[in-house]
Amino acid sequence: MPLAELMSQIQELSKIDKLRLMQFLATELVKEEDANAIFFVANQEYPVWSPYNCSEAANVLMNLLATKQQQKNG
């Protein structure tokens, strides 16, 4: 199938199908790059950072905003 034909078919996909295609292509590229590397294991938990309960960071930002506001006001 020519690339132009494939691209026109991709444009007709729904947003979720385009995202699934991106995930598939990224996985295929990783497989081709290093067939022995396993980046994610099925049924494994991976930690993800979240901004929740990060009051120290919020305080730093609030202090920075207050300082900038004071500089702006005089």
Image (cartoon, helix red, strand yellow):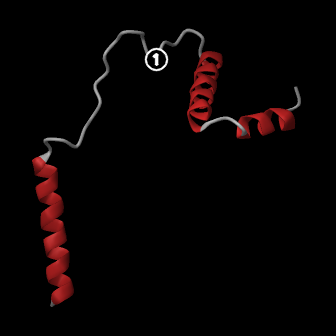
Image position of 66 (left or right of 6) = left
Residue lying furthest bottom in this view?
74
Total numbered circles: 1
Quarter of the rendering containing residue 24? top right
Estimate the x, y position of residue 31 in percent, counting from the top left: 61, 16
Quarter of the rendering containing residue 18? top right
Estimate the x, y position of residue 53 in percent, counting from the top left: 13, 41
Which residue is labeled 1 in the image?
A: 39
Q: Which residue is drawn at 20% across and 76% down?
A: 68
Q: Which residue is drawn at 18% across and 60% down?
A: 61
Residue 1, above or below 74: above
Quarter of the rendering containing residue 16? top right
Image position of 49 (left or right of 22) = left
Quadrant housing the N terminus: top right
Q: Is mark 1 on a helix, strand or loop?
A: loop
Estimate the x, y position of residue 19 in percent, counting from the top left: 57, 33
Image position of 65 (left or right of 8) = left
Residue 52, above or below 57: above
Quadrant housing the C terminus: bottom left
Of 8 and 41, the residue lying toward us: 8
Q: Residue at x 11, y 50 (%)?
A: 56
Local packing at callout 1 (Cα closer than 10 Å; few below 14, some 14-19, many 20+) is few
Amino acid of disc 1: Phe
Q: Residue at x 72, y 40 (%)?
A: 11
Of 60 and 10, the residue lying toward us: 10
Of 63 and 22, the residue lying toward us: 22
